[in-house]
Structures are given as C-alpha cells and as structure tokens.
Image (cartoon, rainbow, N blue to C red):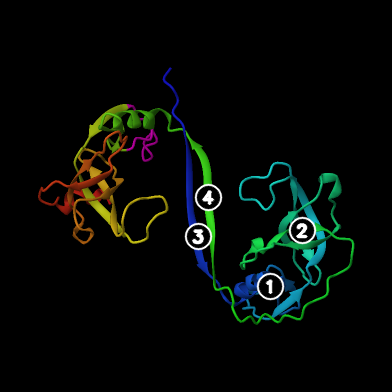
C-alpha cells in the first residue's frame, strides 16, 4: 500500500481594520486603564461597546465608564492553553459582567485550578504592563474580594486615540492529499502535470479531486496535460506577502493548461506586469529541486482566441 502523504500547513495573515469612534474610544480607554461601554436608548450599558443597538439598530455614541471589577456569570476551565492565548498556564475562560455594565465580557481568569472558580465570584482586571490600545491590554482577570472599583471620570475624549488595529489571523493544520492528489504531486516531481478525466462529462480536472464535482462520479483515468497553457484571468498583486521573496507588483493568474478542463493558479514572470493579458500563452519555469513550477512565462505564441478558453473563466 503506498505511503499516505501528509504535511503541516500554516495559513497566516495580518488583518488590518480601521476603527469607528466607539471602538476607538474603547481600545484607547484600555490603553489608559479605563473600561468604556456604550449606553443604549433604553438605558442598557454594553461592554464591549458596539456602534449600533443589537435590538433596535439605532446608532450608539454615548460612552459610559464602567468599573474594572465585576462578577463571573459563567466559565469553562482551559487545562491546556494554546499558542497565542492570554496565559501560558491553565486558566479559566470567563464571562464577566463588569460593575455598571449590562452585558458580559469574555476573557481569561488566572486561578490556581477549577475548584477555585465559580459562577458569581468577584474578579478584577489585571492590566498588562505595556499597553498599546488592544483587548490584550487586559492581561487577564484575577480573584477580587472587594466591592466595585471607583470610576476615574474619563468621558471618552482622548488626545491620542487609537484609530486602527492589526489582528493576526492564523490556522495550523495537517493536510493529507488523498489518492488523486498524491498522484498529482508525484507527477510534479518529474515535471509533469497529471489530471483525472470524468467518465461522464469527460472534463479533465487539474489538480484532480478523485471525483467529478459536477457529475458526482469517481474519477480514475489519468491524463497528462500541458505543459503549456493559457491565461484565462489574472490579478496584479501590490502588497508584499510575509516571507515571500517576490518584488511587487507581480501577476498571479488562472492558467488553463492545454488539455485541462479547469484552470489552476500560477505566477506570471518574464514579462512586465502591465503586459499580462487574458489569452496570453505561457509555459512553466522550473528551478532546481523544486516540486512545482516557480512561475509561468510567455511562450511567444499568438494569444489564444477568447472562444478557446471562455468556458474556463
């Protein structure tokens, strides 16, 4: 039985967003060790604040300071913290209704064990030593025996407000390609591109999927396609990716290899980015030891007629 292929994969990118006045005030307040909520038309105070009432959709703007102390409304014990979580040692995830708030805030509670946590327990914010205007300015919550903390009198007006945040998004997983894509990967190691033909509609899928998504039948007949192909559509990339040593701008395209019934992705090189076009005929460029083409370059052939690839857009 052939070896099952698998590989660890990481999808990671920074998510950048601007902030409206309510979220800006909330995060700037955390930087200043102040928690701000927003008051609704019926007198509720929402923490974290939102810009529109979730019940009436009314725009909200009246900021209200709440205490840095509160009550646990529910909790769950995290016995094995993961990378990027608030604490490196076991802790409790808790919903805390801060004193003066009408809703609960989700965060971590530093406690010695699950027996030390209960619904209704009093807690207070432990502020991070270095604060930048992010939810992580609250390092965690900790048990608290006293009453509500005294308000500071902050109204939400700040001289240097936070106007945007960058939130890293990351997904770690192990990928196993299965029979059809394993054959595709093995063929790439010999600089060949192999797809599979549907026995019903006769479309050749590259990369193969093991079944035809249109007809719903298994595929097994291998078909070698390419190596040349046609650019069906493309985009110009102007933002440099982390850990990708390619100067911007560059072109990333859908390429229909000759004989394939499905376009695959590839970078276009060997031509100025503003000269790439639909119908451009291209061929793969391999580097030593690579398991897939580094990029595709023009072949010098006349452009393909639109009718030859319009069904692959």
For the residues labelled 2 and 4, say whether their Cβ atoms are less than 8 Å apart: no
Report crowding for label 2: few under 14, some 14 to 19, many 20 or more residues within 10 A (C-alpha).
many
Q: Marks 2 and 4, Cα distance to the nearest angstrom?
A: 25 Å
Front residue of 15 and 89:
89
Q: Earlier in the sequence, mark 3 or mark 4?
A: 3
Q: Earlier in the sequence, mark 4 or mark 1?
A: 1
- Residue position for label 1: 32
Q: Marks 1 and 2, Cα distance to the nearest angstrom?
A: 17 Å
Q: Earlier in the sequence, mark 1 or mark 2?
A: 1
- Residue position for label 2: 141
- Give the vertical position of 39 relative to 15 (above or below): below
- Name the quadrant of the N terminus: top left
Q: Is residue 153 visible?
A: yes
Residue at screen point 10% across, 50% down = 302
Report crowding for label 3: few under 14, some 14 to 19, many 20 or more residues within 10 A (C-alpha).
few
Front residue of 235 and 195:
235
User: Where residue 150 sits in the image (x, y, percent)?
Assistant: 83, 75
Q: Earlier in the sequence, mark 2 or mark 4?
A: 2
Which region is colored magenta? 207-220
Q: Marks 3 and 4, Cα distance to the nearest angstrom?
A: 10 Å
- Give the vertical position of 298 relative to 120 (above or below): above
- Residue position for label 4: 170
């Amino acid at each position: 039985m052939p070896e099952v292929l698998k590989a660890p994969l990481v999808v990671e990118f920074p998510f950048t967003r601007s902030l409206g006045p309510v979220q800006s005030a909330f995060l700037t307040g955390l930087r200043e060790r102040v928690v701000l909520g927003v008051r609704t038309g019926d007198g509720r105070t929402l923490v974290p604040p939102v810009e529109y009432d979730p019940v009436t959709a009314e725009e909200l703007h009246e900021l209200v300071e709440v205490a840095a102390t509160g009550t646990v409304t529910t909790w769950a014990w995290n016995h094995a913290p993961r990378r990027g979580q608030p604490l490196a040692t076991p802790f409790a995830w808790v919903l805390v209704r801060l004193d003066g708030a009408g809703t609960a805030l989700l965060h971590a509670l530093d406690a010695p064990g699950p027996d030390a946590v209960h619904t209704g327990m009093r807690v207070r914010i432990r502020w991070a030593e270095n604060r930048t205007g992010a939810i992580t300015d609250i390092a965690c919550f900790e048990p608290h025996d006293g009453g509500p903390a005294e308000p500071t009198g902050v109204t939400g007006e700040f001289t240097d407000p936070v106007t945007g945040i960058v939130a890293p998004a990351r997904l770690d997983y192990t990928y196993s390609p299965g029979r059809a894509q394993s054959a595709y990967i093995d063929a790439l190691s010999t600089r060949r591109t192999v797809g599979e033909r549907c026995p019903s509609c006769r479309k050749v899928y590259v990369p193969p999927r093991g079944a035809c998504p249109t007809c719903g039948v298994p595929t097994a007949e291998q078909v070698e396609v390419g190596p040349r192909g046609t650019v069906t559509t493309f985009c110009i990339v102007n933002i440099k990716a982390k850990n990708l040593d390619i100067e911007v701008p560059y072109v990333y395209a859908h390429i229909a290899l000759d004989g394939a019934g499905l376009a695959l992705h590839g970078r276009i090189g060997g031509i100025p980015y503003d000269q790439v076009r639909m119908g451009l005929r291209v061929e793969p460029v391999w580097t030593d030891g690579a398991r897939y083409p580094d990029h595709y370059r023009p072949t010098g052939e006349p452009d393909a007629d639109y009718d030859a690839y319009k069904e692959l857009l």
